[in-house]
Amino acid sequence: MLDSLDKKSGISLYQQIYEDIRGDILSGRLSEGEKLPSKRALAERLRVSLVTVENAYAQLSDEGYITARERSGYYVRYSGGAVDAASLSAEPQYNLSDEEKDELSGGASLFPFTVWAKLMRRVILERGTKLLVPSHGCGVWELRCEISRYLYRVRGISVSPECIVIGAGTEYLYNMLIQLLGRDRSYGTEDPCYSKLSRIYAVNGVSHQAVSLDAQGMSVSALADSGVSVAHISPAHHFPTGIVMPISRRRELMYWAEQGDDRYIIEDDYDSEYRWSGKPVPSMFGMDRTGRVIYVNTFSVTIAPSVRIGYMCLPERLVELWENRLGFSSCPVPVFEQYTLAEFISGGYFERHINRMKKHYRRIRELVLQVFTLFEGTTISEERAGLHFLADICGNADEVMSFCDSCGIQITPLSEYFIRKADSDDRYVVNYRSADEDSLSRYIKEKGR
């Protein structure tokens, strides 16, 4: 057992005592029935308060490692034999799908963890027991206000906090929208599209149509022929083709929505922050004057995939329907995380983080594009925005695949994203979010010899 504690380690003293005794029990150094030092004796030996030892013993007792005997003391209770303590803390291994690999962010090392930790501590100290009070079903007011201000500054979107709904990622919000708008509708998605969308509509048992694209995005004529009443699109930067929908097509789609009382557009603006030339194209929600566009975005792309906080902006005509139909539901995002994110945005940290990420990915993008010019017969398109582009690969696919694998680039046949079978054997989606900058530089240097 411990003879002293490290008071500069950053680990609480009671935690150090708990982990040391637990480790001795699991390794077999302390056997079942063996008596532990009294709380007062151990406190004097380690030169800590009696409360510190009491907390450690209480934790061990709660977890079943030790037991208290009246007027006798504490004894080892665990009888499972020697156990490799390290194996208990080892993370299980998961096999990720290609789509999940696409979501892994190579820029995670740029995230300001020290700032986030400071804000977490501030939230705990300032909010205290208020953190235990459930938030409004649409999310905490402070976060909704900060998102409202951010959208106005960055995207030119004027939206009241009352119209913003916080959710545990966009997938959760899509499910809620189906409940809000109704299962008796027919929903249309772009084809090809982010494959989870069709699964979400399928698992909800609603009618779902794949609407084809042309060079400007979702085809208006194909949309009209489909008979759907809700169009789900990503106009700022379509995944996976990378098409940036021009203003003219956006207006055509909005005109389509205005022709029926039950028509809506779900605008997925998932990576609008990453645009490499020109100004961001105005959002459809910001252009909407008839209340037909629902805006959806997420912090999973800009902060980290594990941050399951998304939000949507409802047109005012749907806010009352939300309250009547779904107002009873609780916000699934922990209050603590919502307040921390609100502080992160209000303090300017979020926008500074975005700027760092853009600089990082701009360098990565330039290196990747430089390499692709070295592959004879390969052409790229739709690289003006986002963290992926399309590549037409003719005759040297093995070489391109080997390069991508060595540099952490995810490359997937475009055909895998079509809902209806399509012939696109030579077209690939190149996602460089997790690309390694040093590997790219070495590759260019070696090929330039």
Image: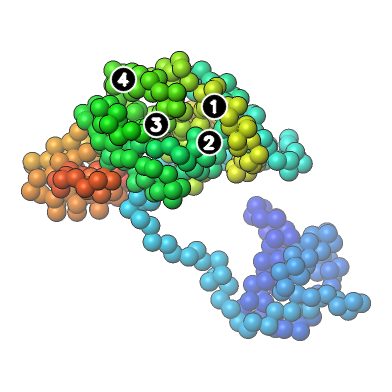
* Foreground label between 2 and 3: 3
Mark number displayed over residue 252: 4
Per the image, the residue denoted by label 3 is 229
Residue 413 as seen in the image, left or right of residue 161: left
* Of the image marks 1 and 4, the number of the one nearer the N terminus: 4
Q: Position of residue 441 (x, y in %)?
A: 24, 43
Q: Nearer the viewer, residue 152 or 138?
A: 138
Label 1 amino acid? Leu
Label 4 amino acid? Glu
Crowding near the residue tagged with mark 4, few <14, some 14–19, many ≥20 C-alpha atoms within 10 Å? few
Q: State whether residue 312 appears in this view.
A: yes
> Cβ–Cβ below 8 Å for labels 3 and 1?
no
Per the image, the residue denoted by label 2 is 180
How many numbered tags mark residues here? 4
The quarter of the picture where residue 122 lies is: top right
Crowding near the residue tagged with mark 1, few <14, some 14–19, many ≥20 C-alpha atoms within 10 Å? some
Q: Position of residue 105 (x, y in %)?
A: 40, 45
Per the image, the residue denoted by label 1 is 318
Q: Position of residue 78 (x, y in %)?
A: 70, 79
**Element class at badge 1:** helix
* Foreground label between 3 and 4: 3
Residue with the most extreme top position: 289
The quarter of the picture where residue 301 lies is: top left
* Of the image marks 4 and 2, the number of the one nearer the N terminus: 2
